[in-house]
C-alpha cells in the first residue's frame, strides 16, 4: 500500500490555554445560503448522547433556521461497513462519525471527505492539540468533540486489601503490584482478549513509552519499524504475560458484553485493574446490578518504563469526531461541527458524562472525579499518541492488533509482531 | 429431468406446432422473467462483480484502478492463516461425516422404533435446529464461560478435573465449536434419516427375519442400503455446511484465539470488513465459491446421479 506524506497525523498534543466563547465559534457563520438539510450519522445509541444529540440538532436549527439537522443514530460497529459503502454510493451522509488517523487518511485519499480548514481556521486553535489526530497533511478534514486517554481503572478496595498503598508509577512498581495482588489471592487484571484491541493497548502503550515521539509519528507514515524500541515493547509485554496477571480464559473474554466481560469483571469487583479508555466507567455502569458506576473505582496512568525514550507523561488515547462528506453543503456542515465544539455543547458533553470535552475552558464541566483526573493528565500531557490501530491505515492497524493478540495467545514473539505488521504494510 | 423436454416436444408435435410453441415460450418468459431478474440482480451480477474486483487491490473507497491480476489469489493460497482456516473446514467435514452422521443415524434408528414419548423425543432432538446460529452462539457463550454451567456441572458430578478453558484453550476451542455445531445440526440429520426410514419397505425386514438374519445383518444389508440416497444427500449438505460455517464461529470466538477456530468464511470477513482489503477478501470468496462449486458438481455427477436418475428408492425432495 502506498502511503502519502502526512504531517501532524497521529499526534494529539495538548497545547496552552486560550479562552473561547460560543459566539466566536458562531461568528464565522454569517453567510447567506438557501435552506439545507444535513444528514448526521452518529453512534450515540446508548448513554447520554441519545438525548443530547437530538437536542443539539434542534438548538442548531433554532440558531440557523435555514439549516435543518437530521440525526441518524447507528450502532457503533455498523460504521465500519456502512461508511465505505455510503461514501461510494453517490449519496453519502453529510456528517458522519470519524475516529481520525489512518482511516481518515484513506477517506481523504479517495476524495470522499471535505477539507474544512478554511471554515474552521478562526477557532480550531481553541481545541488545542486535540485537532491534530483529525488532520491530514496539515489540513483539517474532521473535528473531534471528545478526546480521552487510556489508563488503568482500578479497584481501591482490592488494592487496600492487598496492602498496596499507592498507584504504581514505574513498570517495576507495576509488576510488584501484580505480584502483591496475586499473593493476596486477587486476580490482578482483566482483559478482553477476544476483541484483540484491548491486548493492543498494552503493546501500543509500551511503544509510546519506549519509542521517541519522532520514531512513533514517522512510523504512522512510513510503516518503518526497524527501531529497536518496537521489539522492546513486545519483550515488556512478554514480561507481563509471564507474570500471568489476567483472569482465567482471558483469550476468549469479550471487552464489553455482559458481566463476564473484562469491564463486567472489573465493575463487579472480581479483578483489581483493567487497562481501558475513558469510556470504561460508562460501560461498567451498564454491567452492574444497580446500573451505577462502582464507588471503588480509581484511575492511574500507564506506568513509565525504565530506559524509555518518550517524554515523561506521554499518553495513548483517541476520541470521536465528525467529518463532512464531499457532497455536504458548506459552510453549513462546518458550522454545525463548530457548534458541537462551542462552549454550550462542550460543557454538556462534560457534565452528562458523554465524553471529555476538547474545548479549552470547559474542563470544569466534567463531574466525575475519575474522569477529571483523566482530563487533567490529558491536558498536561506533552504528547498523546492516537491508538495505533486507528493511527495506521485500516489494514495495517488491524494486522497489528491481530499480531499482538497472537502474542497474548503465546503464538508470536516480539520479533514476529514487528515482522507481521511490517509485512502487512507491504501487502497490496 | 432429461425425459421432460422430450415429452413436451412430443405433445407439441401432436398439435398445430407454430402458434403453440410461441405461446409456450411467451408463457415461460412471462413466468420466469421476475425470478430470472431477481436471480440476476442479486446473485449473478454480484458473483461476476466479485470475480472482477478480486483482480484489484481495493480498499472499498478508492476508484477501482489498481489492477494486480492474480496477485490476490497467489497471496491467499500462500497465506498460512487462510490455509489454517481451510484446514479447520476440512476437519469439520471429516468430523461431520464420521461422528455427526453415524450419531444421527443411530438416534434416528432408535426413534424409529415404537418408543414411549417418541414424539416428544423427536421434538427435543429437532428443537436446536430451529434456533438461529446467533442465538445458539450466545447461549453457549454463557454455558461455556469459565465457571459457567458446564464447569459447574462437571465439578458437581465429581469430574472437576475435566474442566477446561473451552473457548480460550487453543487446542480445545475448535472441538468445543464442533460439539456446539453438532448439537445444533444433528436434529436436522435425524429428521432426514427418519424420513428415509419411512421409505424402507417393512416386507424386506420381515423377509430378512424369516431368513434368520440377526438385527445387525438386517441393519447392514437391508436398512443401510435402502437409506443410501438419504445418506448421500445428508453427506452433501453436511459438507457444504462445513465449508460455509461462519455465524456461530464469528459470534463465539471471532475465529480466535490466534486463529485457532478460524474458518474460510471467518478469514474472508476478517480481511474484508475488519481490514478493508476488499479486493483480497473477494479473491478468498471466489476460492471458497470454487471449492463449493467443484465439489457440488463432482458430487452431483459421480454420487447423486443414480439417485436422481431413479433407483429403487427416490428422495422425497
Image (cartoon, coloured by chain):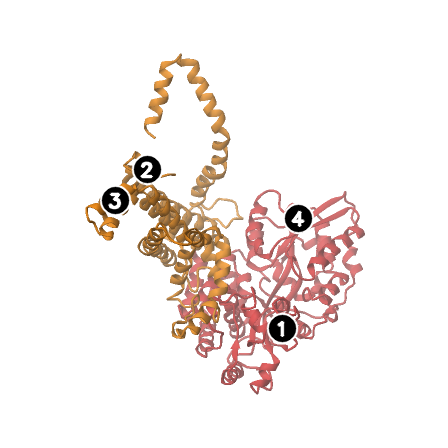
Chain colours: A red, B orange
Residue matched to label 2? B314
Residue at the (60%, 78%) spot, across then down: A155
Chain containing the residue with disc 2:
B
Q: Are marks 4 and 1 on the same chain?
A: yes
Chain containing the residue with disc 1:
A
Q: Earlier in the sequence, mark 4 or mark 1?
A: 4
Q: Are marks 3 and 1 on the same chain?
A: no
> What SS does tag 3 mark?
helix
For this rendering, which residue is in front, A119 or B106? Answer: B106
Q: Earlier in the sequence, mark 2 or mark 3?
A: 3
Q: Nearer the viewer, mark 2 or mark 1?
A: 2
Chain containing the residue with disc 4:
A
How far is the residue under mark 3 from the one under mark 1?
A: 89 Å
How far is the residue under mark 2 from the one under mark 4?
A: 59 Å
Q: Nearer the viewer, mark 3 or mark 1?
A: 3
Instruction: Tell me the tag on residue A382.
Output: 1
Chain containing the residue with disc 3:
B
**Quarter of the rendering containing residue B228:** top left
How far is the residue under mark 2 from the one under mark 1?
A: 77 Å
Residue A145 locus on image (x, y percent): 68, 61
Instruction: Tell me the tag on residue A94.
Output: 4
Residue matched to label 3? B206
Amino acid at each position: 500500500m502506498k502511503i502519502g506524506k502526512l504531517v501532524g497525523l497521529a499526534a494529539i498534543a495538548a497545547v496552552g490555554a486560550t479562552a473561547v466563547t460560543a459566539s466566536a465559534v458562531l461568528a464565522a457563520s454569517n453567510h447567506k445560503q438557501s435552506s439545507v438539510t444535513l444528514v448526521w450519522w452518529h453512534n450515540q445509541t446508548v448513554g447520554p448522547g441519545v438525548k443530547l444529540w437530538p437536542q443539539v440538532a434542534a438548538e442548531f436549527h433554532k440558531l440557523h433556521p435555514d439549516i435543518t439537522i437530521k440525526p441518524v443514530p447507528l450502532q457503533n460497529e455498523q460504521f465500519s461497513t456502512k461508511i465505505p459503502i455510503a461514501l461510494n454510493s453517490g449519496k453519502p451522509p453529510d456528517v458522519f462519525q470519524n475516529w481520525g488517523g489512518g482511516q481518515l487518511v484513506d477517506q481523504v485519499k479517495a476524495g470522499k471527505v471535505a477539507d474544512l480548514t478554511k471554515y474552521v481556521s478562526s477557532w480550531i486553535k481553541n481545541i488545542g492539540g486535540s485537532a491534530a489526530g483529525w488532520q491530514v497533511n496539515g489540513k483539517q478534514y474532521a473535528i473531534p468533540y471528545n478526546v480521552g486517554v487510556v489508563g488503568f481503572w482500578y479497584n481501591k478496595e482490592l488494592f487496600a486489601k492487598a496492602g498496596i498503598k499507592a498507584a504504581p508509577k514505574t513498570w517495576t512498581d507495576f509488576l510488584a503490584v501484580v505480584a502483591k495482588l496475586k499473593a493476596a489471592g486477587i486476580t490482578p487484571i482483566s482483559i478482553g482478549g477476544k476483541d484483540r484491541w484491548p491486548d493492543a493497548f498494552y503493546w501500543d502503550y509500551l511503544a509510546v513509552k519506549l519509542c521517541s515521539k519522532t520514531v512513533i509519528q514517522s512510523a504512522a507514515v512510513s510503516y518503518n519499524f526497524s527501531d529497536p524500541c518496537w521489539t522492546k515493547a513486545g519483550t515488556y509485554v512478554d514480561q507481563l504475560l509471564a507474570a500471568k496477571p489476567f483472569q482465567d480464559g482471558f483469550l476468549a473474554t469479550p471487552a464489553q458484553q455482559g458481566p463476564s466481560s473484562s469491564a463486567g469483571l472489573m465493575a463487579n469487583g472480581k479483578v483489581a485493574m483493567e487497562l481501558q479508555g475513558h469510556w470504561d466507567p460508562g460501560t461498567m455502569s451498564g454491567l452492574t446490578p444497580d446500573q451505577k458506576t462502582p464507588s471503588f473505582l480509581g484511575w492511574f496512568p500507564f506506568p513509565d518504563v525504565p530506559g524509555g525514550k518518550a517524554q515523561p507523561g506521554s499518553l495513548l488515547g483517541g476520541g470521536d469526531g465528525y467529518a463532512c462528506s464531499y457532497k455536504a453543503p458548506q459552510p453549513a456542515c462546518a458550522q454545525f461541527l463548530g457548534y458541537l465544539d462551542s462552549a454550550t455543547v462542550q460543557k454538556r458533553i462534560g457534565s452528562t458524562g458523554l465524553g471529555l470535552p476538547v474545548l479549552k475552558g470547559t474542563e470544569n464541566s466534567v463531574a466525575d472525579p475519575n474522569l477529571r483526573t483523566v482530563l487533567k493528565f490529558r491536558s498536561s500531557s506533552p504528547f498523546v499518541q492516537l491508538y495505533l490501530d486507528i493511527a495506521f491505515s485500516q489494514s495495517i492497524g488491524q494486522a497489528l492488533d491481530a499480531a499482538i493478540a497472537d502474542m497474548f495467545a503465546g503464538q508470536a514473539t516480539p520479533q514476529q509482531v514487528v515482522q507481521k505488521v511490517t509485512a502487512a504494510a507491504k501487502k497490496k | 429431468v432429461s425425459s421432460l423436454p422430450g415429452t413436451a416436444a412430443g405433445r407439441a408435435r401432436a398439435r398445430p406446432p407454430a402458434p403453440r410453441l410461441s405461446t409456450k415460450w411467451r408463457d415461460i418468459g412471462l413466468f420466469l422473467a421476475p425470478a430470472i431478474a431477481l436471480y440476476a440482480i442479486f446473485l449473478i451480477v454480484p458473483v461476476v462483480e466479485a470475480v472482477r474486483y478480486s483482480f484489484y487491490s481495493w480498499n472499498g473507497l478508492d476508484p477501482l484502478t489498481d489492477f494486480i491480476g492474480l496477485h490476490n489469489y497467489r497471496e491467499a493460497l500462500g497465506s498460512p492463516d487462510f490455509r489454517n482456516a481451510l484446514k479447520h473446514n476440512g476437519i469439520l467435514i471429516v468430523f461431520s461425516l464420521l461422528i455427526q452422521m453415524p450419531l444421527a443415524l443411530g438416534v434416528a434408528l432408535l426413534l424409529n422404533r415404537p418408543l414411549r414419548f417418541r414424539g416428544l423425543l423427536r421434538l427435543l432432538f429437532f428443537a436446536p435446529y430451529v434456533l438461529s446460529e446467533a442465538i445458539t452462539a450466545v447461549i453457549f457463550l454463557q454455558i461455556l464461560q469459565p465457571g459457567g454451567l458446564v464447569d459447574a456441572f462437571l465439578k458437581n458430578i465429581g469430574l472437576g478435573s475435566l474442566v477446561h478453558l473451552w473457548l480460550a484453550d487453543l487446542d480445545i476451542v475448535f472441538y468445543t465449536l464442533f460439539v456446539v455445531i453438532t448439537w445444533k445440526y444433528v436434529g436436522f440429520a435425524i429428521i432426514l434419516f427418519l424420513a428415509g426410514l419411512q421409505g424402507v419397505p417393512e416386507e424386506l425386514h420381515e423377509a430378512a427375519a424369516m431368513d434368520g438374519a440377526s438385527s445387525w445383518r438386517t441393519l447392514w444389508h437391508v436398512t443401510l442400503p435402502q437409506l443410501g440416497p438419504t445418506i448421500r444427500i445428508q453427506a452433501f449438505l453436511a459438507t457444504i455446511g462445513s465449508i460455509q460455517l461462519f455465524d456461530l464461529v464469528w459470534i463465539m470466538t471471532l475465529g480466535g484465539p490466534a486463529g485457532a477456530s478460524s474458518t474460510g468464511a471467518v478469514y474472508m470477513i476478517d480481511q474484508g470488513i475488519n481490514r478493508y482489503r476488499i479486493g483480497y477478501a473477494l479473491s478468498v470468496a471466489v476460492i471458497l465459491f470454487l471449492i463449493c462449486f467443484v465439489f457440488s458438481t463432482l458430487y452431483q455427477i459421480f454420487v447423486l446421479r443414480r439417485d436422481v436418475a431413479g433407483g429403487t428408492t427416490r428422495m422425497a425432495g
